[in-house]
Image (spheres, rainbow, N blue to C red):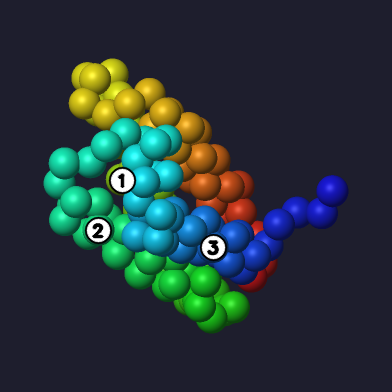
């Protein structure tokens, strides 16, 4: 199997973040069926908007060292933030256990960025 380039990883992670951000905006009921009802919709919409912006940043990153570095920083920061929330608030019982699915995905993105850190663009 061929190694994934950092540019392709940036695109893939960008698409993931775009879909993750768009889902609650386009189909809130199905999102809440999986991840639980939200009382603060403004917060749901804020996080969705941030994920859309981060995903777009990654998806449109230039295929240069600087562009990939920016996509990596954006992606890693986003994944670390979401992973931290998942790992703090699931055990506390604040958010449903289904967020552990997201935690696994975010850990996967963090790992992928580490693995590709020294690969050519």
Q: Of label 2 and label 1, which has the lower sequence position?
A: 2
Q: Disc 2 vs disc 3: which is toward the camera?
A: 2
Say if mark 2 contacts mark 1, CB within 8 Å.
no
Q: Residue at x 35, y 40 (%)?
A: 32
Q: Nearer the viewer, residue 38 or 93?
A: 38
Q: Is residue 6 visible?
A: no
| Residue at (48, 58) in percent of width and height | 19
Residue displayed at 24% across by 51% down: 44
Answer few, some or many: residues within 10 Å of disc 2's Cα (few below 14, many 20 plus, some between 14 and 19): some
Q: Could you tell me residue 99's position as x and y percent?
A: 39, 32
Q: Earlier in the sequence, mark 2 or mark 3?
A: 3
Identified at 27% across, 37% down, the residue is: 37
The residue that disc 1 covers is 81
Quickly name the residue at label 2. Answer: 45
Tag 3 residue: 15
Image location (x, y in percent) of residue 71: 46, 66
**Contact? badges 3 and 1 (CB < 8 Å):** no
Quick one: 72 or 13, which is closer to the camera?
Answer: 13
Seen as rendered, the residue at the extreme front is 29
Tell me the SS state at disc 3: helix
User: Which label sits on residue 30?
Assistant: none
């Amino acid at each position: 199997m061929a190694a994934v380039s950092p540019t392709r990883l940036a695109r893939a992670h960008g698409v993931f973040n775009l879909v993750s951000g768009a889902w609650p905006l386009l189909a809130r009921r199905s999102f809440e069926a999986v991840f639980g009802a939200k009382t603060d919709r403004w917060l749901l919409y804020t996080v969705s908007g941030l994920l859309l912006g981060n995903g777009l940043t990654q998806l449109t990153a230039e295929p240069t060292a600087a562009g990939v570095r920016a996509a990596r920083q954006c992606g890693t920061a986003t994944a670390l933030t979401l992973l931290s929330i998942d790992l703090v608030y699931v055990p506390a019982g604040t958010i449903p256990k289904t967020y552990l699915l997201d935690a696994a995905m975010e850990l996967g993105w963090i790992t992928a960025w580490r693995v590709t850190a020294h690969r050519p663009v």
